[in-house]
Image (tube, helix red, strand yellow):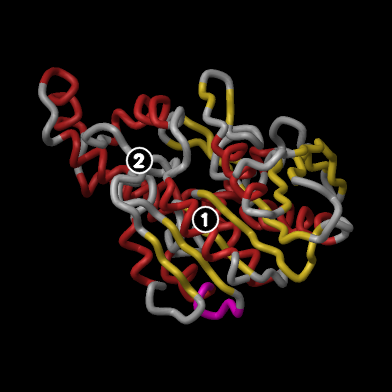
Amino acid sequence: MVTTIEEERVTITNDIEIGATIAYANKNEKRPFVLLIMGTGKLDRDGNSKGFHTDLYKNLSDMFVNMGCVCIRYDKRGTHESSGISKTCGLQDLVNDAINVIHYAKKLEYVDEGKVIVCGHSEGSQIATLIAEKEEVQGLILLSGACMGLKEAIMYQNMLIYDQAQTMNGFKGWILKKTLNKDKIKKQIDDMFSKAEKSEKDTFFYRGSFFNTKYLREHNEYTGEKYAQIIKEYPGKTLAITGKADLQSDYKQLERIASFDRVTVYTPEKVNHVLREIDDDNQILNIKKQYNRVLKNDIYEGIKEQITQWINTI
């Protein structure tokens, strides 16, 4: 049954102003609260940017409201309707911004402050995990990114590109085979994070681009193993979902936490990073075209069923 969903655009003020959307069915009773945290990049709170329309986070918000929750999604620091400077923003800044949204939500009269769930997608899974160390929340939903550090995720994606290049024909395949080398890929990624550790400036230049020093340095403090240890020590419940067709996060990393108490792991077949069932042979160099097609479909039904069952235990 589809619920009539109401939405309010608000500004949450702390050290910066955070542009956010509150979604709910009604304000007549206290309901569980879900904070929705997006992945990397400068998509808006709905999951859209110029030339790339996904509505991924709008879809997730609607899903949570239909499950009987209040949901807040928001623009990251320095993007869209949130102030601050994105190019000097660190990982801990993103964690603290999310906590400030939780504090705001707990004061809403129609939010049950004893049932707070943090749902992170992709990098949002890392942010959500770190929130569990600082703020009392009753549940974590980690979508398409649990138990992987940023460096590990970048390495995983680049190795998939290398593997695909080995089977490509034509001039593009020839070029990629000539230029890509596993040891070289590893060295370049190691060098990038090493430069972040050594840089004394807000940004540093590496291989044709500028990178945020603080952001990479703080991300480099956390490996998949460290995230798994945080989840192990977290007293609330965790639901970790990564599809087996995800080309941006490795579902096998969920094995680190599958045996933990209070942790539920779900790895659906043929489900990709944007929580949809794939419709092709799933190659990382074709991933944006795939996303543009499959995002027209609904979130994979098995994911919605898993989340519904899990939320009812909070």
Quadrant location of residue 279? Answer: top left
| Residues shaded magenta | 231-235
Q: How many marks?
A: 2
Comparing labels 1 and 2, the label whose residue is closer to the camera: 2
Q: Amino acid at mark 2?
A: Glu
How many residues crowd around disc 2 within 10 Å: few (fewer than 14), some, or many (20 or more)? many
**For the residues marked 1 and 2, what is the alpha-carbon distance in whole angstroms?**
39 Å
Q: Is residue 267 above or below residue 10?
A: below
How many residues crowd around disc 1 within 10 Å: few (fewer than 14), some, or many (20 or more)? some
Q: Secondary structure at mark 1?
A: helix
Q: Is residue 88 above or below residue 244?
A: above
Image side of residue 38 versus residue 273, left or right:
right
Quadrant location of residue 129? Answer: bottom right
Residue 232 lies in the magenta-colored region: yes
Q: Is residue 8 above or below residue 190?
A: above
Q: Residue at x 15, y 32 (%)?
A: 177
Task: Identify the mark nearer the N-term, 1 or 2.
Answer: 1
Q: For mark 1, what is the residue?
A: 197
Q: Amino acid at mark 1?
A: Glu
Image side of residue 170 versus residue 105, left or right:
left
Quadrant location of residue 135? Answer: bottom right
Q: Residue at x 62, y 37 (%)?
A: 58
Q: Is residue 188 visible?
A: no
Task: Give the number of the disc on residue 277.
Answer: 2
Q: Position of residue 161 (x, y in %)?
A: 26, 38
Q: Residue at x 35, y 45 (%)?
A: 271
Residue sitting nearer the eye, 275 or 173: 275
